[in-house]
Image (cartoon, rainbow, N blue to C red):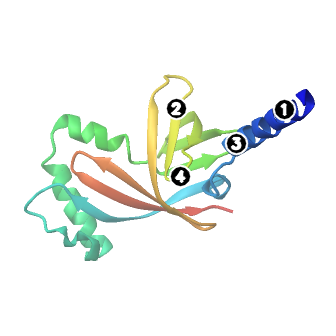
């Protein structure tokens, strides 16, 4: 009787711990080097801008974004610049490099269980960067950044 109870708890324990370690399929898809491709759409928080920004061309979306940026305050501009990544390098060992043009930041990363958020923590300053994943496949990574001006979607292409 004792052995069967122990066996039952062992099986339940293995099942529980095994199910906790299941990662989202996006975990494997994002491994590699990603370079900025294009912007759009920009969804403004401004009440005067129609919600039809999804249908704007890339150029119109960028112009709308620039207008909002020009009218933004100093804190808004600084917060926005912190989301303007030019590329990512995600590695299997859960380390990553975020590129901001000439500046690279070394981080450790973790994806949530739904596969729609990547939290990266700077190894030098412990600052957190959150990337909202809209979609990812073997070629394209689409992200969305929530900035004070609105929501900005950007696409990245996987480098070979």
- Which image quadrant is residue 29 in? bottom right
Quarter of the picture containing the C terminus is: bottom right
Horizontal and vertical percent position of residue 59: 28, 71
Quarter of the picture containing the N terminus is: top right
Q: Is residue 32 left or right of residue 141?
A: right
N-terminal of the pair, mark 1 or mark 2, is 1
The residue mark sitting in front, 1 or 4, is 1
The label number, if any, that marks residue 114 in the structure image: 4
Provide the secondary structure element on which disc 4 rests.
loop
N-terminal of the pair, mark 4 or mark 3, is 3
For mark 3, what is the residue?
21
For mark 2, what is the residue?
121
Which residue occupies the extreme front position in the image? 1
The label number, if any, that marks residue 155 in the structure image: none
Horizontal and vertical percent position of residue 9: 79, 33
In this rendering, is residue 69 above or below 47?
Answer: above
The residue located at (53%, 52%) in the rendering is: 114
The residue located at (66%, 53%) in the rendering is: 32
In this rendering, is residue 142 above or below 94?
Answer: below
The residue mark sitting in front, 2 or 4, is 4
In depth, the one of 132 and 61 nearer the eye is 132
Horizontal and vertical percent position of residue 89: 61, 48
For mark 1, what is the residue?
5
């Amino acid at each position: 009787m004792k052995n069967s109870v122990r066996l039952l708890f062992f099986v339940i324990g293995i099942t529980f711990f095994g199910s906790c370690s299941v990662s989202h399929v996006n975990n494997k898809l994002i491994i590699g080097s990603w370079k900025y491709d294009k912007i759009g759409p920009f969804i403004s928080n401004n009440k005067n801008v129609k919600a039809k920004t999804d249908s704007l061309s890339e150029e119109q979306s960028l112009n709308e974004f620039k207008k909002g940026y020009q009218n933004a305050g100093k804190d808004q501009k600084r917060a926005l610049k912190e989301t303007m990544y030019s590329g990512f390098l995600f590695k299997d060992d859960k380390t990553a490099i975020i590129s901001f043009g000439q500046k690279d930041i070394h981080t450790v990363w973790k994806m949530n269980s739904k596969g729609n958020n990547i939290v990266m923590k700077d190894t030098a300053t412990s600052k957190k960067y959150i990337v909202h994943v809209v979609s990812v496949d073997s070629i394209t990574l689409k992200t969305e950044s929530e900035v004070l001006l609105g929501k900005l979607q950007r696409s990245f292409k996987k480098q070979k």
